[in-house]
């Protein structure tokens, strides 16, 4: 069960990893998933095949808790896919742990691993159930399996294309059978999915940091609307949809991805540093020390400090050993919950004017506690700088942004938020500053970013789209 503080952070949904044509496929998938652990900590799973049948293991917990040497040795085969999960849709249950495994009348065994979220999965599930489909999970990934099974096409690649064309939303998808691996990216490329090579083996990963861990070379991104088919005949690239304008999730650069990953050739740490530099350019402030909320804001804080000529210091320390499932104290002791995760370093902040860099403000409760923590540790002023624009709209693509009414920026001005969190000043990075800092190139104004949670411009049709919020003013 999630505790309240979980809802004050944006949460990634999942990470996927796949490898084709390596004798140690499952073991390499293990190391790949380990590198992707930050993308999901609720469950992990690997399915491997030697061409005669699936061997798989899935369980709740972290990758190193779910697998041991004996389990990995049992996952024989030269092809494997793996998954780490944080559930935003579908409950946190073992039955929802991916890869999901099915028996398909036409192709036999089928395993699916996805990162992303399907916008109309609930409605499609109802329609499929009305046609007689029986669902075994509450994960929307199962909708894809049923759409493949229900397709009028017999050949797998055509059935998959048919299914993908019925989906709306974000998906970086791996589909394993006993003789092939299919890899697909949604038409907007909302979630990152990279392709690499390890010797003669093809590897796929949500992030390139997994390639570095196993010594694979990066080849390219899987393209929006692309379907790759890998089997004995080799690798074929097909397109299942006209690629729409690219809209990679901005928060991959701002917050989710590991700093050592590259997305579309842009290093995440470098992009974040540039966000920090831009923040200083847009909202300079006189201060003695710059600190970042660890870990995701560290790079932006370094960038801000460099641009400002103010020392960067570790003013906040994260307790790395607080798991996601720590027992949350009672309502009255909730303040302790944050202190278990973060501490202010008194010797660094005492008597100082502090610039505190964070990557986002969701509900504002965590920001308020951190500002108070810094002041209790003796900071004379706390100036908050946020390396993203205000989050005013919910995400429909797999990021847990909480409900619209819980998003503090949806109905408060920047000045009101500043007041609520107790900061001496507050500034959110501009959209243009974000786009310029990351440095993606693109024909459209967004330069290949999804910016929907900032401006409501969803790249796909969202029928349930909510009304326009009160505009927050920079203050
Ligand atoms: S709406 Fe926001 S969180 Fe969701 S995919 Fe777009 S940029 Fe990312």
Image (cartoon, rainbow, N blue to C red):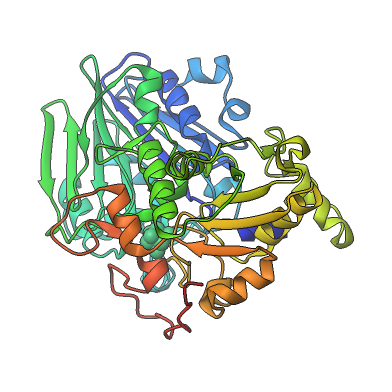
Q: Position of residue 97 (x, y in %)?
A: 53, 44
Q: Position of residue 51 (x, y in %)?
A: 29, 24
Residue 177 drawn above or below residue 14: above
Left or right of 114 on screen, residue 373: right
Q: Quadrant of residue 3?
A: bottom right
Q: Position of residue 174 (x, y in %)?
A: 32, 41
Q: Quadrant of residue 396?
A: bottom left
Q: Please indicate, yes or no, whether residue 147 appears anywhere in the rendered image.
A: no
Q: Please indicate, yes or no, whether residue 384 appears anywhere in the rendered image.
A: yes
- Number of labels in the image equals 0
Residue 160 drawn above or below residue 346: below
Residue nearer the viewer, 345 or 333: 345
Q: Residue furthest front?
A: 286
Left or right of 202 on screen, residue 10: right
Q: Position of residue 98 (x, y in %)?
A: 47, 43
Ligand 1 shows up in the quarter that is: bottom left
Residue nearer the viewer, 446 or 450: 446
Q: If the image is split into quadrants, where does the N terminus sit?
A: bottom right
Residue nearer the viewer, 151 or 343: 343
Left or right of 33 on screen, residue 449: left
């Amino acid at each position: 069960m999630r505790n309240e503080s979980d809802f004050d952070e944006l949460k990634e949904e999942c990470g996927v990893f796949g490898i084709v044509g390596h004798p140690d496929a499952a073991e390499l998938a293990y190391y790949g998933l380990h590198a992707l652990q930050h993308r999901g900590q609720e469950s992990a799973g690997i399915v491997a095949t030697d061409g005669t049948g699936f061997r798989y293991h899935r369980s709740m917990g972290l990758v190193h808790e779910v697998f041991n040497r004996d389990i990995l040795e049992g996952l024989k085969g030269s092809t494997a896919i793996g998954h780490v999960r944080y559930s935003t849709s579908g409950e946190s249950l073992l039955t929802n742990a991916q890869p999901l495994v099915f028996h398909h009348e036409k192709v036999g065994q089928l395993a699916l691993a996805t990162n992303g979220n399907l916008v109309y999965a609930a409605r499609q599930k109802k329609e499929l159930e009305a046609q007689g489909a029986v669902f075994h999970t509450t994960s929307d990934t199962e909708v894809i399996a049923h759409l493949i099974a229900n397709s009028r096409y017999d050949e797998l690649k055509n059935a998959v294309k048919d299914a993908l064309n019925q989906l709306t939303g974000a998906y970086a998808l791996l589909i394993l059978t006993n003789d092939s691996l299919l890899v697909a990216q949604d038409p907007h490329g909302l979630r990152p999915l990279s392709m690499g090579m390890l010797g003669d083996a093809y590897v796929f990963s949500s992030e390139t940091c997994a390639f570095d861990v196993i010594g694979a070379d990066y080849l390219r991104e899987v393209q929006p609307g692309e379907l790759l088919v890998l089997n004995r005949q080799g690798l074929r690239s097909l397109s299942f949809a006209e690629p729409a304008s690219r809209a990679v999730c901005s928060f991959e650069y701002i917050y989710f991805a590991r700093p050592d990953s590259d997305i579309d050739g842009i290093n995440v740490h470098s992009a974040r540093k540039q966000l920090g530099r831009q923040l200083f350019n847009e909202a300079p402030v006189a201060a003695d020390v710059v600190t970042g909320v660890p870990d995701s804001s560290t790079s932006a804080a370094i960038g801000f400090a460099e641009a400002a000529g103010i020392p960067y210091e570790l003013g906040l320390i994260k307790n790395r050993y607080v798991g996601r499932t720590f027992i949350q104290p009672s309502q009255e002791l909730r303040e302790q919950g944050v202190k278990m995760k973060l501490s202010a370093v008194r010797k660094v902040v005492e008597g100082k004017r502090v610039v505190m860099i964070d990557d986002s403000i969701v509900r504002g409760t965590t920001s308020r506690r951190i500002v108070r923590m810094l002041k209790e540790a003796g900071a004379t002023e706390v100036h908050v700088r946020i390396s993203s624009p205000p989050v005013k709209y919910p995400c429909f693509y797999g990021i847990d942004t909480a409900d619209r009414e819980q998003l503090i920026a949806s109905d408060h001005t920047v000045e009101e938020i500043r007041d609520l969190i107790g900061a001496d000043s507050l500034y959110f990075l501009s959209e243009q500053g974000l786009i310029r800092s990351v440095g993606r190139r693109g024909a459209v104004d967004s330069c290949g970013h999804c910016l929907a949670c900032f401006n409501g411009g969803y790249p796909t049709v969202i029928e349930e789209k909510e009304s326009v919020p009160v505009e927050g003013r920079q203050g």
